[in-house]
Amino acid sequence: MSVAAVIGILAAAGCYLLMQRGIVRIALGFVLLGHAANVLLVSSGGVARRGVPIVGAAGTPADPLPQAFALTAIVIGFAVTAFLLALAFRYDEQTGNDDPEDES
Amino acid sequence: MSRLLVLPVAIPLLAAALTLLMRSKLAIQRALSVAASAAVLAFAIALVARTAGGEALAARIGGFPGPFAISFAADTFSALMLTVAALMVLVCTAFAIASRDRERPLLHPLILVLEAGVSGSFLTADLFNLFVFFEVMLISSYVLLTLGGSKSQVRSGTIYVATNLLGSTILLAGVGLTYAIAGTVNMASLASLEDPLRRLAVPGAMLLIAFAVKAALVPVHGWLPSAYPSARPAVAALFSGLLTKVGVYALYRVYSVVFDGDPAIRTLLLVIAATTMIVGVLGAIGRERVTEILSFHIVSQIGYMIMGLALFDSMGLAGGIFYILHHIVVKTSLFLSAGALRFFDDTDSLRDLGGVARERPVQSAAFMVAALSLAGLPPLSGFFAKLILLRAAFATGEYWIAGVAIAVSFLTLASMVKIWNGVYWGERPGDAPERPLRRSRVAAVAAPAATLALISITIGVAAEGMFTLSETAGGGLIDPTPYVEAVIGP
């Protein structure tokens, strides 16, 4: 339940920022939305405490696959965030603001 | 051969790394880039020959048993898509070399990474890896689109990146939910799920919406016409042929293999297809730049492909696949023609151009053939693509969508005639540029578009062979047993 609430709050905050003007806010919105998706990925394998997923280790092993998914998604999200911030920087350099809707 | 399935991803990635190291040596960059694309093309043609009978191949990377390995799989549909994509990369690379690749040393590495992403999307048998290859393709496309960093490029780039990123996030969440419910994201394992549309209702909807964003279906098409016209000519041509079609491919693959072509959403798909056709073709009216008009027509044409998918019978799928293959060739040819205008005349605005047919006849003929093929005149490839779709619509009793498809074809023809009159016919308003054109340069820039126009004619003349291949590919979607058995074993 707490995981669902975390995902909901992250997604709501992310969507709110996406609706704002300015590339930096959009970038931050995608960071939050990406976190929501990553938490969702990790929770898709179950969130109860379990043992390490190594053959021969004690206890019920955790499902390693969603964790691998989340790791991959984090790396991709990092690259895209860096690119969005570079876009914002470039736009700011040329126009003095980071709002592509601003025609002036 | 099945172990070699990783090559269409590995070769371009390796070549991208090498071209990146050779940034200062243009000749080596060009040679590497052409060689890599040609190698992928050769492999893809061999793959088509190997799967032409409806067989499927799979490579299990890591040596784990079926459902747990990272699987690459190819059936007739994948092989055909791979071939036409590799051909487009090769032709667009040739165009980039003939026009201006000197200014941008990153162009060739980025095109190669894009090719790796596109090939990977066509070959992977795993939803999560589909997401990864989508991202590989999209991240290089983000950079390609904004290469140059002008104000208009950054502005349209922001819209493009934001829309596609939102689509990717929805896709990722959909994959996560699929795993939570089904315990697997391997498409072959998902194929055996009972009643998939009900059990995977929410993640399924998320996946299909995400693919619809990538494919630029109405109402999530707005990013496409705002992004493509600001890209460099060679890049716009490459995007027009490849990007949206990867989304369409994913829709075909997931709807047929995972959801068994469930007729419950058929009417919805048909309505979306019709709306996409109409909105796209109407959007093109009143546009002044050739690239803008052509960009709206991409949206319109995607509707025809989804129409084939929605009909979901042997004829409909064959028509849809035929349409995708034809469209990639023709659309890229048209964008290369528009690119040639931007290269020689520094504009592609209908108002500032005229009389190009007299100045550069070969280029103009290439445009003419591709434009008529897009509108669907016999004996070009577009005629047969539309004919098969219309026959499928009549056979299944969906007469209204056939009517929409025919009406949109006429509007497409009108749009193409408008470009022809504005750009190629008549007199140039104002003075012609005094730049003396070297004949070899004119020929080199015209050759890529002309080659693709010739391929469109060839597909039209050899339509029966192409139809048989498309029918086999469609058969592999209706009954994906060979695909499933290749991936997870019988």
Image: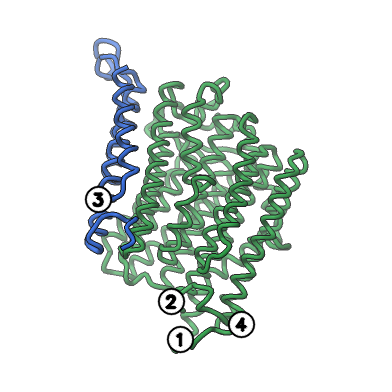
Chain colours: A blue, B green
Q: Pointer 4: what residue?
A: B426
Q: Is residue B396 above or below residue B382?
A: above
User: Pointer 3 indicates a residue of which chain?
Assistant: A
Q: Are marks 3 and 4 in contact (CB under 8 Å)?
A: no
* Callouts 3 and 1 close, C-beta under 8 Å: no
Q: CA distance from mark 1 to mark 2?
A: 10 Å
Mark 1 on the same chain as mark 4:
yes
Q: Which mark is residue B433?
A: 1
Q: Are marks 2 and 3 on the same chain?
A: no
Same chain assignment for discs 1 and 2: yes
The image shows residue B120 at horizontal and vertical percentages of: 44, 44
Which residue position is annotated with label 3? A85
* CA distance for labels 1 and 4: 16 Å
| Mark 2, other Cα within 10 Å: few <14 / some 14–19 / many ≥20 | few
Give the label on residue B393, or none.
Answer: none
Label 3 crowd bin: few (<14), some (14–19), many (20+), radius 10 Å? some
Residue B473 placed where, x, y %? 62, 42
Q: Mark 2 highlights which residue?
A: B346
Mark 4: amino acid: Gly
| Dot 1 or dot 4, earlier in sequence | 4
Q: Does residue A33 appear left or right of residue B415 in this picture?
A: left
Left or right: B384 as drawn, with respect to B95: right
The quarter holding residue B434 reads bottom left
Up-down relation of residue B44 to residue A3 (above or below): below
Q: Is residue B462 above or below residue B393?
A: below
The kind of residue tagged 3 is: Leu
Q: Position of B144 compared to B258: left or right?
A: left
Residue at 30% from the left image edge and 58% from the top image edge: B18
Amino acid identity at mark 2: Asp
The Cα–Cα distance between marks 4 and 2, rounded to whole angstroms, is 19 Å
User: Real-space Cα distance between discs 3 and 1?
Assistant: 40 Å
Considering the numbered disc 1 on the image, is that residue within a helix, a strand or a loop?
Answer: loop
